[in-house]
Amino acid sequence: MSPNRKILTFKSRHQVGEIIEGKILEYKEPNLALVEIEDIEILARIYINCPKNKKLKFKIMSLKPQIILKEINHLEIII
């Protein structure tokens, strides 16, 4: 599947406000990591110190025009 098709599929499966999980693949800079979510690689700001391959939770903030995710930790999830 092409990268554009993966992004369109991701956008159709999810909605703003949803909590999803992603895995840190590598750091590009301090606090800027390449994260894998459903076979899509997305650059994300990470504000907690996490090793590579660590899974984190993200809240979907926007899907249009681009995917915007906010990293959250377990203390920020309210049930």
Image: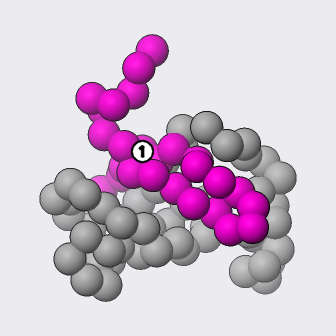
Q: Residue furthest left?
A: 49
| Magenta residues, start to end | 54-79
The residue nearer to you, when weighing 52 against 14, is: 14
Give the quarter of the figure containing the N terminus: bottom right
Q: At 41% across and 60% down in the image, what residue appears? A: 23
Q: Residue furthest top?
A: 79
Q: At 35% across and 73% down in the image, what residue appears? A: 33
Residue 9 horizontal/vertical position (percent):
81, 61
Q: How many numbered tags mark residues here?
A: 1
Residue 56 painted magenta: yes
| Above-or-below relation of 34 to 13 | below
Q: Is residue 10 visible?
A: no
Q: Secondary structure at mark 1?
A: strand
Residue 4 horizontal/vertical position (percent):
78, 79
Q: At 33% across and 31% down in the image, what residue appears? A: 76
Q: Is residue 55 left or right of residue 1?
A: left
Q: At 61% across and 70% down in the image, what residue appears? A: 40
Residue 1 painted magenta: no
Residue 21 horizontal/vertical position (percent):
48, 47
According to the picture, the residue beneath numbered tag 1 turns out to be 57
The amino acid type of the residue labelled 1 equals Lys
How does the figure colour the protein chain or chains? one colour
